[in-house]
Amino acid sequence: MNISKYKKKIPEKIFAEIEKRGFKTLRPCQYKAIDAGLFKDKNLLVCTPTASGKTLVAELAALNAIFHDQGKAVYVVPLRALASEKYSQFKRDYPNLKVAVSSGDIDGNDSYLERYDIIITTSEKFDSLIRHRTPWLRSVKVVIIDEIHLLHDVSRGPTLEVLITILRKILPKLQLIGLSATIGNPEELASWLDAVLVKDDWRPVRLDKGVYLDGEIEFM
């Protein structure tokens, strides 16, 4: 989908930002997310294949929180390595925004994060920040949860579930964006999140399934 067709649906400042990044088209999950209420602060559960464009949906939500809602965006990832990766990406792609990463073991409220627009963290660290009543939490307008299917993980799932539950209680107007490529029960999870389900099968590279036996592959 040519991005110009969605110019009226994308806030002017955000459109200018992504146009500056060189985006000419929107992938299915991206324009479906916009149609589902991305810029109207609707909760969204985006369930589409790997490399289908979910990260840009998250970036658009973050930009909307910063430019339109005059607040902060928190990007939650499961691993420190992913936190560092996302931090580098956001710093590179949005040099005019203040981006921070908080994923260490030190238990505290990290009050210095008050100065930043986008905060990238792990679920465990964010849970710690909330429990220490971090002063900048009231400024958070959107929380993006990457790999949200880890709610079913025996080690990380309980922390993530409690985190989401607490956030919805203390920030009733918060926008939640869940991202995943693998959810077995997306409708059920979307209902729990009170979110609109954005689902699509498009992927940039075709995926063929087959069975390998005795040096030959039989495609299904």
Image (cartoon, grey):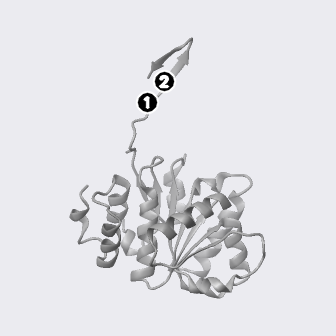
Viewer can see residue 79: no
Residue 187, image x, y percentages: 49, 53
Q: Amino acid at mark 1?
A: Asp
Residue 155, image x, y percentages: 74, 55
Which residue is situated farthest in the left direction here? 5
195 vs 163, left or right, is left
Q: Tell me whether circle 2 and circle 1 mark residues in contact (CB < 8 Å).
A: yes
Q: Residue at x 48, y 23 (%)?
A: 210
Give the camera-side residue of 139 and 120.
120
Crowd around label 1: few <14 · some 14–19 · many ≥20 (10 Å): few
Q: Amino acid at mark 2?
A: Gly
Viewer can see residue 135: yes
Residue on which disc 2 sits: 210
Q: Secondary structure at mark 1?
A: loop
Crowd around label 2: few <14 · some 14–19 · many ≥20 (10 Å): few
Give the camera-side residue of 158 and 215.
215
Residue 205, image x, y percentages: 40, 39
Q: Is residue 145 above or below residue 180?
A: below
State the image quarter where residue 203 is shown.
top left
